[in-house]
Image (tube, helix red, strand yellow):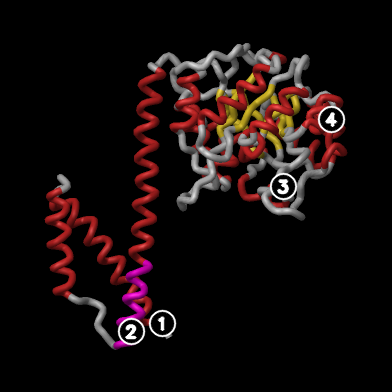
Amino acid sequence: MVVEVDLKPLSIKGLKGKRPLIMAGPCSAESEEQVLITAREIAALGVPVYRAGIWKPRTRPNAFEGVGSVGLPWLQAVKKETGMLVSTEVANVKHVYEALKYGVDILWIGARTSANPFAVQEIADSLKGVKIPVFVKNPVNPDVDLWIGAIERINQAGIEEIAAIHRGFSSYDKTIYRNSPHWQVPIELRRRIPELPIITDPSHICGSRELIYDISQKAMDLNFDGLIIETHHQPDKAWSDAKQQLTPEGLGKVLDRLIMRDPDIDAELMLTLAELRDNIDKLDDKLINLVEQRMKVVENIGTYKKDNNITILQNKRWDDMLRSRLILGERKGLSEDFINKIFSAIHQESINKQTRIMNED
């Protein structure tokens, strides 16, 4: 089902049709010096939009929750000195009024806020009669209808320049990501609102700067419209989310490496392929987690053998186990050679772990 939303292209200050749209800047505005130093270095890369958190919703109390309105003049200084557009997150009506008063160019609604229809509606009501682009992050849970609902509320307030920000989703599953990308959710959003720009937030998906390029490239491979990347001139000293922020130099390297695919390739085929690959990624995560659980049992066995003076290698047990796995693998359509290689590697790693345990003092 295609959702009817009255949208206009992002046309502010020459952004119309430019892909990828890059937004970069620190997780949190910490000081005027930090904001301006980072902005100068990002502007030198040709980035058109500066992002900085003025108010920071945090999971626990007493954490740094942003400098508040005192930081808004710093964003004004960024605009004046660099010419970049400036953007920040708003979570309530007061934030909206303060941001508009200081000339913020783009507002975004965060994941915790977009999950709350009451909060989104209050923000939407405060924006009636205002002409400003508003970007809506996905809710914390993978619910495309809730995401669309937040977008519709903003659009029905008269906001026509809207984009979605894909920042990943909370998950109980143990993965390498801070927030699981669940690519099928933004893919479904693209199917249902084809004209809606989608900007991926690799910083919040990854939680680690080392993974940012791969997620950024995947977003471009899916023909998404932009990236919002947390960037700090001294990320290791950042007051929030230090591990996921790049230096401006690191940002430049990521942007230089990006490969832009031909947008005329059949989009539906690309989305279907991406969904299938996403399924493989999730299954691989589960596979690795299962192997980890298996190795924990192996370590318990190793400790038991050590305590009871039992030899590590039990040839009959190994022969019986391999035979049963080969039979099961054949039933599942897996070749004997494949099963042999997998379980021989697992068996060798099990022996290595038990050997280390045996040799511990």
Sequence-earlier tag: 4 or 1: 4
Quarter holding the C terminus is bottom left
Q: Nearest the camera: 243 or 169?
A: 169
**Relative image position of residue 122 (x, y in whole percent):** 73, 28
Amino acid, disc 1: Glu
Sequence-earlier tag: 3 or 2: 3
Sequence-earlier tag: 4 or 2: 4
What element does badge 4 sit on?
helix
Amino acid, disc 2: Lys
| C-alpha distance separating marks 4 and 1 | 62 Å
Circle number at residue 360: 1
What element does badge 2 sit on?
helix
| C-alpha distance separating marks 1 and 2 | 10 Å
Q: Quadrant of residue 132?
A: top right
Is 15 above or below relative to 277? Answer: above
Query: Tag 4: Cα neighbours inside 10 Å, few (<14), some, or many (≥20)?
Result: some
Circle number at residue 234: 3
- Of tags 4 and 2, the one toward the viewer is 4
Query: Tag 3: Cα neighbours inside 10 Å, few (<14), some, or many (≥20)?
Result: some
| C-alpha distance separating marks 3 and 2 | 49 Å
What element does badge 3 sit on?
loop
Q: Is residue 93 visible?
A: yes
Provide the residue span drawn in magenta: 296-308
Judging by the rendered image, the residue that carries numbered circle 4 is 98
Q: Residue at x 71, y 33 (%)?
A: 51
Is 63 above or below relative to 166? Answer: below
- Of tags 3 and 2, the one toward the viewer is 2
Q: Is residue 304 magenta?
A: yes
Judging by the rendered image, the residue that carries numbered circle 2 is 306
Q: Main secondary structure of the magenta part?
A: helix
